[in-house]
Amino acid sequence: MTLKSLLLAASVAAMPVAALAEGAVKVGMITTLSGGGAGLGIDVRDGFMLAVKQSGNDAIEVVIEDDQRKPDIAVQLADKMIQSEKVDVLTGIIWSNLAMAVVPGATAQGKFYLSPNAGPSALAGKGCHKNYFNVAWQNDNLHEAAGAYANSAGYKNSFILAPNYPAGKDALTGYKRQYGGGLAGEVFTQLGQTDYASEIAQIRASGADSVFFFLPGGMGISFLKQYADSGVDLPVVGPAFSFDQGILQAVGAAALGVKNTSQWNKDIDNPANAAFVASFQAEYGRLPSLYASQGFDTANLLLSAMAKADVKDTDAFRAALEAADFASVRGNFAFGSNHHPVQNIYVREVIQEGDVFTNKIIGTALENHADVYAADCKM
Amino acid sequence: MTRETVVNAALTLGLLIVPMWALMADEPFIITLATRVAILALAGVGLNIALGLGGLVSLGHAAFFGLGGYAMGILASHAQSYTPLITWPVGIEGTTSMPLIWLVAVLAAGLGALVIGALSLRTSGVYFIMITLAFGQMLYYFAISWPAYGGEDGLSIYLRNGFPGLNTLVPIQFLALCYGLLAIALILSARLAASPFGLALNAARQSAARVQAVGLSPYRLRLVAFVISGMITGLAGALFADLNRFVSPTMFSWQTSGEIMVFVILGGVGRLFGPVAGAAVFIILEHVLGGISDYWHIYLGALLLLIVLFARGGLIGLLAGKAAHHG
Amino acid sequence: MSPILLIEQVLNGLQFGMMLFLMSAGLTLVFGVMGLINLAHGSLFMIGAFAAAAVAAATGSFLLALVASLAAAAAAGALVEVLVIRRLYARDHLDQVLATFALILIFSEGTRWVFGSFPLFLNIPPYLSGPVTLPGGIEYPLYRLTLIAVGGLVALGLYLLITRTRLGIRIRAGESDREMIAALGVDIQRLYTLVFALGAALAGLAGALVGAIQSVQVGMGEPVLILAFVVIVIGGIGSVKGALVGALLVGVTDTLGRALLPGFFGLFMEPSAAMSMGSSLASMLIYILMAVVLIAKPSGLYGATV
């Protein structure tokens, strides 16, 4: 198995464990590898390990564990990594609620945490920490970009929906923050809901001119298929999560032409990205997803800091991370004052290439965009 | 001395020796795992009173586990942010004192069990399983969508709550505390089974009509057992939240109910030490198998299946032979 | 809310209810005849959906996919019945719950092992896609109308099977007295395998039909399983008629609750609080319905009194 051999290579290279070389870093990756949400965790892990492999750096050792998408398991694994594996850096968590369970404790114990996916607002604002770095986005970012796109597309009356949980409420808040038009309706769905006939009927009756939705994972697949079949043909816009490489094949033609917002796509034109997309396909035999790109960037950020400073010298290492001196597959990448990205967010359109569904960039929704919570962050 | 007593003594000894060894070998994570075992076993001891003694198959004990957890989360988060819990009619502040939190957790879970039990015990058999499940799900969805205390994100507590005279942040001291509570619950549970109340309850499980004929109300007996059961599970919930320094709606999910039940059945229904054995084996399996493969749930499932099919009476039954009182 | 929208929502509720009925019919049959609680029923739903997606991808035919879903789920059902379930009939409900919980773990991760971690594609066939206009100017998806019809046909088929055929007589006899019909020379083991496979096939069919408008992914069975349990408990365990009534009741309550409650709270609360409150209550509604039914009728609407 590719992963096992990678792991083996990474850990054999770093042996003997007791006598790690000067500047060596031990990384604990807690991510979702089993159950329904496993696709995201596997992508983050594969992207991360690809970067580690490509670097040829033998001073990095990665311990990977499966959190089963359960917050209490994630906390237990974090304890294990900190107490018995004695890792220097933690990373890998996909879901905001798991991040909220793990990150405050880990950073309080002096560990670095690099987030490859989740960016809850509490950790960007009042709850920010000098050892917490988010390499993906603050949760609101992609929704804000969707709102900005809605303005530029001239939408005046959006119908918006998201699941009834904190990330869902943040999504609608994020959209409304940038969107200037009126609302035809605002609906909270049930978390894990699979049937959207009732909501689609409301959309049809609402007189809206556009639909914004945030329904991650299987919920988005269900919604899009049912929406496409309903005969309602209002334009749809949403964040990249429901249109990513991993799930587009399952949505199929129902997603064609939909505009979605993302900080990355495989056609961003820079050498790092071209090399990443080609090597990921060669290594794993599938197109990389947004999550894979985030895992890849996270590893490269870490490697860039390792080249500059010893992880035991916390202040120097932190400064090296802050510099973000690596070739991001997104092109320009910098950290804001709260250690969250300042980056471009693009508008993508779902297209078909041969028999594969994928995205292409059609414009930039927000340039050098930072989050609104940075002002509350006192480090 | 029966074989079951020997097995129980061996379990007790094992639970004491392993953390001692871990302390010596500087393996703090083993202590954390042992704490987890103790807390989950406590939840199981609670369920076992309803399940083993009362014959009440509750698939909704996550409700009490979660109530205990949220009692801790809500009190500690108010103390953490220095905001009063309520200001009217009297001002009540949050707290970080464990004994106080435990009291609130036990009361909240007991009250929950009283309401849920009073309604659910009107039914029996599969209907009882399902109605307890339904109450658990109600609380689960309520916790997810109720914004005041974090919704699905849950609540993080930065410091473990305090206990007079102990530093609970030191893993071994928190473990000692959990062991102490587990021991008390075990003693209580043994006393309860031997008491007139326990005997009447056991009789009601076997033949409700006869109990009724001697002038006792099976409904009341069961309700009292259900409330005691819920209280102990609620206490476990508060400890579990303190172990993780975190509460979330997953504590209310039906999978949590299922897992607590798995501990009890795995160990042996109605056996005093059944939940202890079950929780210990489950955590060890999860820990060992998780490292073997991405698809470790398959092995876990296969093992559980083999135990149900071929080791009737659970692990304790396997080691100690057939129980005297429960078939 | 306009009358047209209301009618549309009732139709949505009916359709959702019919899908729940397909899931619950098998569950309630298996319970009624064998006295078995099968938590792994949701896994059979998932197997049906995955088999359909695989066959649809290979052949391009939706009808073949449906046949495959029936066959795969029935085969999986018969297999676990012979290997595992058969040993559980004489056990108490506890052992059944634990063993079938273990089966969920095995089925879910086994499916992920075979098909990978990403959702599969399964779509509505072109001849059933798109909306049709109903009398009164309601636009409604043809596929959902088809689902209502399929549910109705299955209900009718089951009714005929149970009341008019030899197998049905045995099923009813097995429900009331299993020792007696064994003594009368009926091969009870074969009957049980058959009933279990029939229940599994219905779940598989539901999985395939629903898979076309939802996401075909690991774990898709569990939320539906819980709903199916709610349905059979409301209807009375063991009663197919109860499953039908319970399913429609749950389907309509859930759909109308989601559609109407936020607006209802909006009458006397500010919009965002009403939205939040309404959605919370809507997600608890069917469990409240179930609790109320059980408190009023402790063995469900059509259950035999315990």
Image: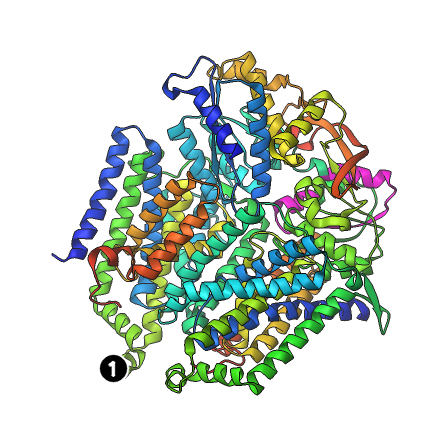
Decide if residue A125 is in sight here. Answer: no
Residue A51: image x %, image y %?
Answer: 59, 24
| Residue A184 left/right relative to B70 | right
Q: Which residue is painted at 30% across and 35% down in the image?
A: B172
Which stretch appears magenta? A143-171
Residue A21 or residue C139, whichever sits in front:
A21
Horizontal relation, residue B45 to residue A148: left or right: left
Q: Which residue is mark 1?
A: B214
The image shows residue B146 at horizontal and vertical percentages of 58, 52
On the image, the x and y values in percent for residue C182 come to 39, 82
The front one of C242 and A320 is C242
Q: Given the current orientation, which residue lies at the most extreme right position?
A: A154
Residue C78: in magenta span: no
Can residue A149 be found in the magenta stretch? yes
Chain bearing mark 1: B
In the depicted structure, whether residue C107 falls above or below residue C201: above
Q: Is residue B302 visible?
A: yes
Q: Secondary structure at mark 1?
A: loop
> Which quarter of the image is occupied by the C terminus of chain A?
top right
